Image (spheres, grey):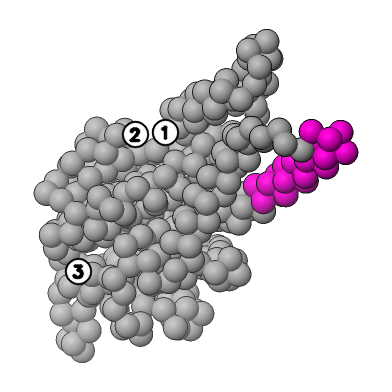
Amino acid sequence: MASANGDGTIAFGRVQMLLSKRSESIAFFGGKGGVGKTTCSSAYAFALANKGLKTLLVSTDPAHSVGDLLEVKAGPEAVEVADQLWVREIDPEEASYRYLNEVKGNMRGLAAPSLWKEVERQMDFAAASPGADEAALFDDMVSTILTAESEYDRIVFDTAPTGHTLRLLSLPELMSVWVEGMLARRAKTKELHRMWHNVAGVSEVEEPRDQVYELLERRKNRFAAARKRLLDEKATSFYFVLNPERLSILESAKAMALLQKYGVSTGGVIVNRVLPADVDGSFLAKRREQEAQYLQEIAERFSNRQQLHIPMQAEDIRGLAGVAEIGEWMNRNRFGSL
Ligand SMILES: Nc1ncnc2c1ncn2[C@@H]1O[C@H](COP(=O)(O)OP(=O)(O)OP(=O)(O)O)[C@@H](O)[C@H]1O
Ligand SMILES: [Mg+2]
């Protein structure tokens, strides 16, 4: 697909090698809606698998399209779609249902039987509330991070448009704070109980195991472990896909600053849908003029990042063969950890 120009540059795109090679096991692909996240994350996962690395491509986008793009049937269970390449789409509704059942099961063990019905009613209300799917999605993402790493060499996340993903990545911190608050309150209640027993002179009574406390503690530990992986720059990278267009550049720059604030390490930048060098016509010439300015802006704004250009293709990218070609291009240019 790439061809050499007279001046020795490659018509397909260009790459700036500014970062030392990474060997991260978790890669996120994010960016504005429609810029090419699914295409690029799939191509990257394909290229990793092609190198013999057992790779899991996970979609956290509720409007999944990994299966559609690759023309494979994907669902909550990982399926092998090519040699060493596995795909799964987290289904928020299914995750929400599973999560709820797990919580209900836990609550049954904790609440008095006379309260079960009320507890279930409350849980069903909670399930229908805004944010419930997101919480379940987040829980699934945490599980994936904690379990898939031992099974796969690489995990690649295809994410939903920026805002949604940023919220998801900020959740480990929010959830930890929340759970810690609950734990502190729980500890205080226990302490009050103990004092009351002392005052009442029944201090010898052995305290029952506090299952709620243990449940919260386990949750806190899971979040903390996932957070540690997300914030470890050797383990996790967040790649931005953008188009040479004003809003796409602005959104990526903002998101990158926010991720930095959260401490998530951002990797390279993929500039997708760059006008190929050999298309002409006066309309395209004008677009190319404007695009040149945006490419310059991207080069400057993200100057400390690896940058890979992917040209606009004449046709839609379809199936494994379509992404394989882009994956090959990423590989040749040693994008990310390739
Ligand atoms: N370099 C390219 N040349 C031509 N078409 C492209 C290119 N990259 C992506 N596309 C097409 O653009 C459309 C959107 O791509 P993709 O689904 O990868 O974007 P996305 O960022 O994942 O979108 P969403 O935000 O909806 O998840 C698809 O039809 C895809 O085939
Ligand atoms: Mg997508």
Does the image show residue 135? yes
What residue would you read off at disc 2? 76
User: Dot 3 corresponds to which residue?
Assistant: 331
Q: Which residue is the site of mark 1?
A: 91
Q: Amino acid at mark 1?
A: Asp
Q: Nearer the viewer, mark 3 or mark 2?
A: 2
User: Which of the two labelled residues, at mark 3 and mark 1, occupies the earlier sequence position?
Assistant: 1
In primary-sequence order, the first of circles 3 and 2 is 2
Q: CA distance from mark 2 to mark 1?
A: 6 Å
Residue at 26% over, 39% down? 78
Label 1 beta carbon less than 8 Å to ligand 2 = no
The question of residue 187 being in magenta is answered with: yes
Q: Amino acid at mark 3?
A: Asn
Vertical relation: 108 (above or below) 291: above
Find numbered disc 3 in the image and state the secondary structure of the residue it sits on. helix
- Report helix, strand or loop for mark 2: loop
Q: Are marks 2 and 1 in contact (CB under 8 Å)?
A: yes
Badge 2 or badge 1: first in the primary sequence: 2
Which quadrant is home to the C terminus? bottom left
Q: Is residue 171 above or below residue 307?
A: above
Mark 2: few, some, or many residues within 10 Å (few <14, many ≥20)? some
Q: Give the residues in magenta.
A: 178-202
Where is residue 309 shown, x and y percent of the image? 32, 71
Residue 22: which quarter of the image?
Answer: bottom left
SS under mark 1:
loop
